[in-house]
Amino acid sequence: MISLRSPSSSILALCLLLFGTFFRVIRADLAPETLPNFSPLMAAALCGALYLPGWIGLIVPLSALLVSDAMLNLHLGEPLLSSQLLWTLPCYLMAVGLGWNLRGKVHGLLPVVGSTLAASVVFYLVTNTGSWLGLAGYPQTFSGWAQAMTSGLPGFPPTWTFFRNSLLGDLLFAACFVLLERSVPSQRMAVRVVA
């Protein structure tokens, strides 16, 4: 016997994942200067892996994130796939792994929000380190790395504001995801597996 979430719970999880993932593409059109980088990417990856059944919880979050990256790059006039994926994709995979790890465990608000916080911090450190290594505007010194983590490049908002905004989006979305998931009746279906 295998215990599965109810179909309504999986549909809610899928809708929230898709909304959260494509929110940043929509926001880029509607309010590009307002809260730059405010998007729930890490929360969408983590919560999708946690709440969607089976391998769907791995495939759908990663596919949605890759498609939204390509759509955003296309919208910004950049190549569909960029070298930044070398830094972002492992972070997405880590968030999916954290969500996958929470499956079958008591996953109240605190573990989900805590895991989302950890994924967001790692994403910030890894992607800004990648920018420091890959962009000629940063000196390849400790002070250059510190600049990549705080003030960023001249002409752009400070990188800590991008971190603050993405963290707010991730934590807010993760909390909403858990609260909405808990509001759906937790009917579980038992399925007999015949070998």
Image: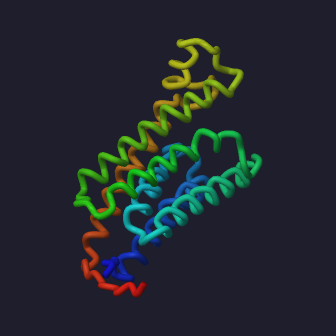
Residue 194 lies left or right of residue 23; in this view the side is: left
Residue 25: quarter of image: bottom right
Relative height, residue 90 to residue 65 (above, below): above
**Vertical relation: 113 (above or below) 124:** below
Q: Is residue 36 toward the left or the right of residue 103 in the image?
A: right
Q: Is residue 152 left or right of residue 190?
A: right
Q: Nearer the viewer, residue 86 or 127?
A: 86
> Residue placed at 52% from the left, 28% from the top?
158
Is the residue 114 above or below the residue 159 in the image? Answer: below
| Residue 52 locus on image (x, y percent) | 42, 69
Quadrant location of the N terminus? Answer: bottom left
Across and down, in percent, residue 125 comes to 48, 31
Q: Find the residue positioned furthest to the front.
A: 195
What residue is shown at x 42% (from left), y 37% (from top)?
121
Colouring convention used in this rendered image of the protein: rainbow
Asked whether 105 or 119 is in front, the reply is 105
Q: Position of residue 54 (x, y in %)?
A: 44, 70
Which image quadrant is residue 53 in?
bottom left
Q: Quadrant of the C terminus?
A: bottom left
